[in-house]
Structure formats: C-alpha cells, structure tokens
Image: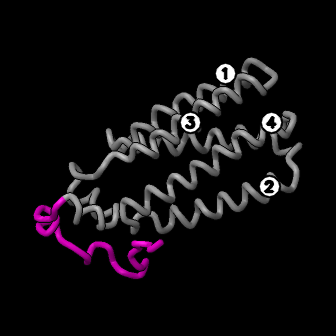
Amino acid sequence: MQYDIVPVEQNVEQMDCEGEYKTLTDEQIKEKPMVLRYKYDRKRVPILHSVILLNVILCVSGIFGALYYLRLPEERFTLAICYSVLFIAASMNQGLINRWWRLIDILMANAILILNVFFYVRKCNIFHLIYGACLFSYFGWYAWTGSTMTVKIYELHTNIWHIGVIVLVYVLPLSVKQENLF
C-alpha cells in the first residue's frame, strides 16, 4: 500500500493556489491534501460515507452499552444522550454540513471518554489500559498528520480509529463491571 502523505515540513499554503484548484478534475482533486481542499474548493470535498456508517455503528453500540450495562438511570441517560448528540454531530461533521459540527463532535467525544473513565477505570485490567494507550497514540499521530493526508488516506485512518473505538466500546462493558471512580 502506498501512502499519499505530504511531508509535514512542507508548507501547505505554498503547495497550490486557489486558481489552480478551480481547473482540477474530480479525480485530480482527490490527490490533494484535505486542508487545501477545504480552503480552496469546499464544494467538491467528498462526503465520507464509510466514516458516517462507522459513526452510526459506534454510536448505536455506545447507546446500547450505556442503557444495558450502567447501573443508575442518571448514568444511563447521561451517556446515552452524549452518544446521541455525538451521532448527530459526527455525521454532520463528516457529511460536511457545517464545520461548527466539528466542535460539538469533539466535545461529545471527550465527554464520552471522561464518562467511560469515570465508570470503568477502577476495574480495567492492564489489557484495557494498554489498548487504550495504543489507540490514543494512534489518534495523536493521525490528528497530527491528518491535514496533510489525501482524502483516501484520511478516510482510511479515520475508519481505523473508529473501528478501534468500536472494539473498545464493546470490550469494556462486556469484560469489566462498572465501579465509579468517586
């Protein structure tokens, strides 16, 4: 597999200009980094359907896990609402409806992370912690280099990240009993 990644040292602003983007075909524009595509030709950025599908699977499994595995109704309601809002915000963000959805997407994902840490961290075994650390290290790398990736590579890494989170959402409640942090 060949990666289409622009070197991080290269100044993305210097690569192409706005006029050049208007003359590119849809196939040629797919080879450009996402950050330039958003900046210069917003209307031709593709909707990432596979990412939206994985968001649906992730959020539905999260809602199911919250409603089925948490003890108190307030805990169930809070986590299920967070997953529901994430479902809408992440789908709108990846569907390129409005970039403000990205902020809500990030806030809900962080809220879900904090809630899951609160509910499960005391009973996690070393496998869960190592897997979570590897997953978040991968996310850090992917977030750092994501703006220079082409659409195909960006979509691939976004899907890998979401599959990793889906596995964690399934494994954690099934293998660990809830014991709140405080």
Query: Can residue 2 be seen from the camera position used here?
Result: yes
Task: Determine the CA span between mark 2 and mark 4.
Answer: 15 Å
CB contact under 8 Å: marks 3 and 4: no
Mark 3 or mark 4, earlier in chain:
3
Q: Earlier in the sequence, mark 2 or mark 4?
A: 2
CB of mark 1 within 8 Å of CB of mark 2?
A: no
Secondary structure beneath label 4: helix
Mark 1, secondary structure of its residue: helix
Looking at the rendering, in which quadrant would you find the C terminus? Answer: top right
Residue depth check, mark 2 versus mark 4: number of the one nearer the observer: 4
Q: Does the magenta stretch include residue 10?
A: yes
x, y percent for residue 144:
50, 67
Residue contact between numbered discs 1 and 3, judged by CB atoms under 8 Å: no
Tell me whether circle 2 and circle 4 mark residues in contact (CB < 8 Å).
Answer: no
Say whether residue 2 is left or right of residue 178: left
Up the image or down, 20 lies above or below 162; here it is below
Q: What stretch is highlighted in magenta?
A: 1-25
Q: Which mark is residue 129?
A: 2
Distance from disc 1 to disc 4, alpha carbons, whole Å, reads 19 Å
Alpha-carbon span between mark 1 and mark 3: 19 Å
Which residue does the numbered mark 3 point to in the structure image?
A: 57
Q: Residue furthest bottom?
A: 9
Q: Are there few (<14), some (14-19), or many (20+) residues within 10 Å of tag 2?
A: few
Query: Which residue in the protein does label 4 denote?
Result: 174
Q: Distance between the residues labelled 3 and 4?
A: 17 Å
Which mark is drawn over residue 77? 1
